[in-house]
Image: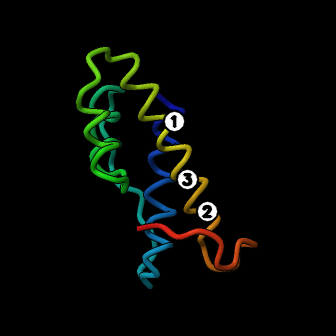
Amino acid sequence: YLAMHREVNKYLEIVHQASRKKKPFNQPKLPPNLEPLAFLAASILQIPPHEKQTLLELDNHITFLQEVRRLLRREITVYSHLRPGSNSRGKGKRN
């Protein structure tokens, strides 16, 4: 639970920074249990619809949790390279 909690907070913070809003990031209150947290994470991931559909079709909750964490880590990596001041200047684009 704690690892996913940290990853969701990190993802939200990075997306907030990428939006270039001037308001400071305030960590939201997240669900206290793993499964609701994973469903929240899946819903906020800014990924293509076909990837979200793949998540919806998973019938094993362990696989679902693993896939959500994998996608969170991937998206954190992508967004962290797109932040102002990163070394990736102009490399790659996110929709």
SS of the residue at dot 1?
A: helix
Position of residue 45 relative to residue 91, above or below, is above
Give the vertical position of 49 relative to 5 (above or below): below
The image position of residue 89, as x and y in percent, is: 69, 78
Residue under circle 3? Answer: 76
Please, is residue 8 above or below residue 17 in the view? above
Q: What mark, if any, has residue 80 been given in the picture?
A: 2
- The foreground one among 22 and 75 is 75
Q: Residue at x 61, y 53 (%)?
A: 77
Badge 3 crowding class, 10 Å Cα cut-off, few under 14, some 14 to 19, many 20 or more, is: many
Q: Position of residue 71 (x, y in %)?
A: 47, 41
Where does the image place residue 58, in percent across and percent down from the top left?
29, 23
User: Please, what secondary structure does the residue beneath circle 2 have?
Assistant: helix
Upstream in sequence: badge 3 or badge 1: 1
For the C terminus, which image quadrant?
bottom left
Display coloring: rainbow
Q: Is disc 3 in contact with disc 1, using a CB cutoff of under 8 Å?
A: no
Q: Distance between the residues labelled 3 and 1?
A: 10 Å
Crowding near the residue tagged with mark 1, few <14, some 14–19, many ≥20 C-alpha atoms within 10 Å: few
How far is the residue under mark 2 from the one under mark 1? Answer: 15 Å
Q: Along the polypeptide, which appears first: circle 2 or circle 1?
A: 1
Residue for point 43% across, 76% down: 19
Give, as a three-letter code, the residue at label 2: Ser
Q: Specify few, some or many for label 2: CA neighbours under 10 Å numbering under 14, 14-19, or 20 or more.
A: many
Mark 3 to mark 2 CA distance (whole Å): 6 Å
The residue that disc 1 covers is 70
Q: Quadrant of residue 60?
A: top left
Q: Residue furthest right?
A: 87
Q: In this view, does 30 lie to the left or right of 87?
A: left
Image height check: is 30 above or below 75? Answer: above
Marks 3/2 in contact by CB < 8 Å: the verdict is yes
Identify which amino acid the numbered label 1 is placed on: Arg
